[in-house]
Amino acid sequence: MEFFRNEERVHLRDEEEELFPLFLRHVRSQPAPLREARVQHVQLEGFARKLGIAVAAGIVDREPLAAAGELLDAHIRLEERQLFPLIEDLVPDDDLRRLGLASRDATCAVRRPPRTS
């Protein structure tokens, strides 16, 4: 629950509010990997909400946890294998740096200090 509440929610928000809009400025239409990632974001948020309710009620079943884990694993694979390489190919280095992403390293959409060299 802590992972979803703290780390994953911030990660998803950063992608939705910063990385994806930047990417969309460099493509004519929304590529399939981006559409799928956005659907998975909604699904992950739904799992987090359901998990929060289950934890508060003291009823946490393995099945929903396993499904959330599988979705998270699939989401990471989608981003690492398809979406982030596409972003790295199509978004100029300077734009990635302005977002605080290391040059040619959008593979984890986590803010990093811009390079100063």
Image (spheres, rainbow, N blue to C red):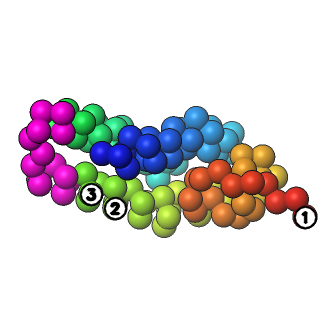
Question: For the residues carrying marks 2 and 1, which lies nearer the camera in this image?
Answer: 1
Asked whether the viewer can see residue 63, the reply is yes
Asked whether the viewer can see residue 43, the reply is no
| Crowd tier of the residue under label 1, counting other residues whose Cα lies within 10 Å: few below 14, some 14–19, many 20 or above | few
Residue 56, percent from left and from top: 18, 33
In the image, residue 77 above or below residue 3: below
Question: Looking at the image, is mark 3 or mark 1 earlier in the sequence?
Answer: 3
Report helix, strand or loop for mark 3: helix
Residue 71, percent from left and from top: 29, 54
The amino acid at mark 2 is: Asp
The amino acid at mark 3 is: Gly
Which mark, residue 48? none
Residue 73, percent from left and from top: 34, 61
| Crowd tier of the residue under label 3, counting other residues whose Cα lies within 10 Å: few below 14, some 14–19, many 20 or above | some
* Nearer to the camera, 111 or 96: 111
Residue visible at 43% across and 47% down in the picture: 8
What's the distance in space between the residues labelled 2 and 3, CA to CA?
Answer: 6 Å
Residue 48, percent from left and from top: 29, 40
User: What residue does disc 2 label?
Assistant: 73
The reply, left or right, for residue 73 in relation to residue 54 is right
In the image, residue 92 above or below residue 42: below
| Crowd tier of the residue under label 2, counting other residues whose Cα lies within 10 Å: few below 14, some 14–19, many 20 or above | few
User: What residue does disc 3 label?
Assistant: 69
CB within 8 Å, label 2 to label 3: yes
Residue segment shown in magenta:
55-67
Which SS type dominates the magenta stretch? Answer: helix
User: What residue does disc 1 label?
Assistant: 117
Question: Looking at the image, is mark 2 or mark 1 earlier in the sequence?
Answer: 2
The reply, left or right, for residue 23 in relation to residue 113 is left
Farthest right residue? Answer: 117
* Nearer to the camera, 97 or 111: 111
